[in-house]
Amino acid sequence: MLYWFLRLAVVGPLVRLLFRPWMEGEENIPKSGPAVLVSNHISAGDTFVLPALIHRRLTFPAKAELFEGTGIKGRFIGAFMRGIGQLPMDRSGGRASATSMDGVLSVLEAGDLLGIYPEGTRSPDGRLYKGKTGVARLVLKAGVPVIPVGMINTQFVPSRIPGVKTIRRPGIRIGAPLDFTRYAGAGNNRNVLRYVTDEIMNAVMELTGQTYVDAYGSSVKEALEQGKEFPAKVLSRPGDGVAPPPMPLPGTPETGAKTPEPAPKPLVTPADVADLPPAVGDGAR
């Protein structure tokens, strides 16, 4: 399979030879079974350094347009993305988005690893930004563990060769699995989704030591592109000062209230795709 050929014979050896990476905590990745790896995103290098070093296959959702290119270059990129098993994610809504979400969930249903960058875009300045709640919806729907990952020093910097950039001693820290199954019945409770997302981002922050900014990275980038200042607040941690959701949640049997019948619709719907950032595409800008 192309994925393992590239991983074992091309990308993996090159990453080790050229960048001399280090990694801590790989034992926290389960040897088998599904899990979602969530990471900060500081460089395009994140998308190949992490898969090159861990021993299990890792699948990222990718911007659908990468699979639909025309011309020699576009067709080559599309074939390459399919060959390494990456998933096209269409966030335009309707049936296309439903198919995209089915593909994302199928990775976990098959017992594999899925990679997500909750920030939705590369950090504009190396700090950690607010996570999008799509990752919480996915995790609660799938009922799988979350593995926090901290990418360190993956920025491209000038090398000794003029005009050529490199990565110097990138690092990966992998944290202990997080379990949010206690909130599986929360539905689309916004407080729960935000709490779960903030807890995930806090675990990432503890691995990287980044400063946390309570704003979406995409909003900050847009303001910078327009030459404007964005009033972003720095917090000691994601969700600082916000109380955890009550347990048990209102409406569960423990409260004595009647539990509604399970809804036939999945927790993650096509409309939620817009809040589940692809790791390759928009998230790699």
Image (cartoon, rainbow, N blue to C red):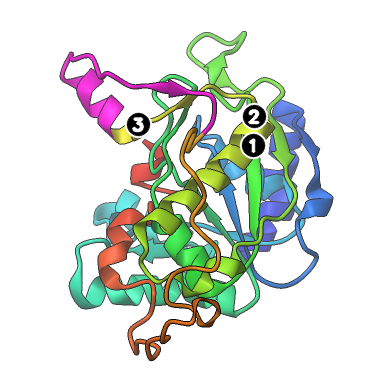
Residue 113 magenta: no
Q: Which mark is residue 150?
A: 1
**Relative height, residue 256 to residue 204 (above, below):** below
Of the image marks 2 and 3, the number of the one nearer the N terminus: 2
**Relative height, residue 64 to residue 127 (above, below):** below
Q: Residue furthest right?
A: 27
Please rate how many residues cluster around mark 1, counting C-alpha atoms within 10 Å: few if below 14, some from 14 to 19, many from 20.
many
Residue displayed at 55% across by 63% down: 247
Q: Position of residue 3 (x, y in %)?
A: 62, 61
Residue 231 magenta: yes
Range of the magenta residues?
A: 219-237
Image quarter in which the N terminus is found = bottom right
Q: Nearer the viewer, residue 183 or 280?
A: 183
**Relative height, residue 144 to residue 133 (above, below):** below
Q: Nearer the viewer, residue 164 or 151?
A: 151
Residue displayed at 65% across by 63% down: 145
Of the image marks 3 and 1, the number of the one nearer the N terminus: 1
Q: Residue furthest front?
A: 256
Q: Which mark is residue 208?
A: 2
Residue 218 visible within the image: yes
* Mark 3, secondary structure of its residue: loop
Q: What residue is pinned by disc 3? A: 215
Q: Position of residue 204 (x, y in %)?
A: 61, 39
